[in-house]
Image (cartoon, rainbow, N blue to C red):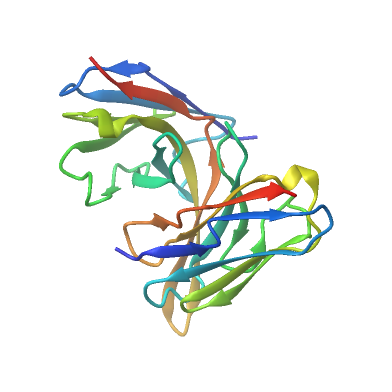
Amino acid sequence: QVQLQESGPGLVKPSQTLSLTCTVSGGSISSGDYYWSWIRQPPGKGLEWIGYIYYSGSTYYNPSLKSRVTISVDTSKNQFSLKLSSVTAADTAVYYCARVRRVVTMVRGAFIKHDAFDIWGQGTMVTVSS
Amino acid sequence: DIQMTQSPSSLSASVGDRVTITCQASQDISNYLNWYQQKPGKAPKLLIYDASNLETGVPSRFSGSGSGTDFTFTISSLQPEDIATYYCQQYDNLPVTFGQGTRLEIK
């Protein structure tokens, strides 16, 4: 079955760039049925969507982070990555990668998309501190 | 952004109880709502998609209902392994947003 695994430094200095990679195993990242996403969770708090990417490279970012975020995909390695620049202590969080299952239906002539984060990585804690 | 408000924020119930969590969206999101379970130290797990559809492999004691702005998540008979935090999530409009979570404890 498909599994996702995050990797990257657990400690990043303020003002530097946070870089994480998610490796997909048991399936191809190039499957057209899925998007690939990053979500984060500060300690003791709720979930915040960061953005997602399609295998073709199309990206969608949370406007609250858009100026600092880059998500990229490497289909040859079956990986996708997150870069978050100019980090501060507020970026300290568990970072999850997740698969977005997309099902498209047609209702009264219109295409309707149905999305769900159906598979998640275990998460990786990133602390921003000097 | 669409705001998702869950209630209650925390809940204590006994094994075998029927448990209900509500989620209200700040605008009409049709049925574009999912529910997740997160156990301590673990990643969230998809339980319900499109407001009322049970994800494959999820026990039938979990259910969801609602459309528009008001949604309900129900556990028909609480089990000890259901202790977790539950989140609703809308995908009608980007950015995707989550509720603040409901922490469920055993009484």
Residue at 75% across / 49% down in the picture? B107
Would residue B35 be found to the left or right of residue B28 on screen?
right
Residue at 69% across / 45% down in the picture? B83
In the image, residue A5 sits, relative to residue B44, either above or below, namely: above
Residue at 60% across / 70% down in the picture? B72
Asked if residue A77 can be seen in this view, the reply is no
In the image, residue A122 sits, relative to residue A112, either above or below, namely: above
* Residue A46 percent across, percent down from the top left: 44, 46
Would residue B18 be found to the left or right of residue B49 on screen?
right
| A33 or B100, nearer to the observer | B100
| A103 or B25, nearer to the observer | B25
The total number of labels drawn is 0
* Residue B86 percent across, percent down from the top left: 58, 52
Q: Residue furthest front?
A: B107
Residue at 44% across / 39% down in the picture? A30
Q: Quadrant of the N terminus of chain A?
A: top right
* Residue A120 percent across, percent down from the top left: 53, 38
> Residue A14 sits in which quadrant?
top left
| B73 or A121, nearer to the observer | B73
| B56 or A79, nearer to the observer | B56
In the image, residue A36 sits, relative to residue A107, either above or below, namely: above
Would residue A125 be found to the left or right of residue B45 on screen?
left
> Residue B62 sits in which quadrant?
bottom right
Q: Residue furthest right?
A: B16
Q: Quadrant of the C terminus of chain A?
A: top left
Would residue B91 be found to the left or right of residue B38 on screen?
left
Asked if residue A50 can be seen in this view, the reply is yes
* Residue B81 percent across, percent down from the top left: 76, 43
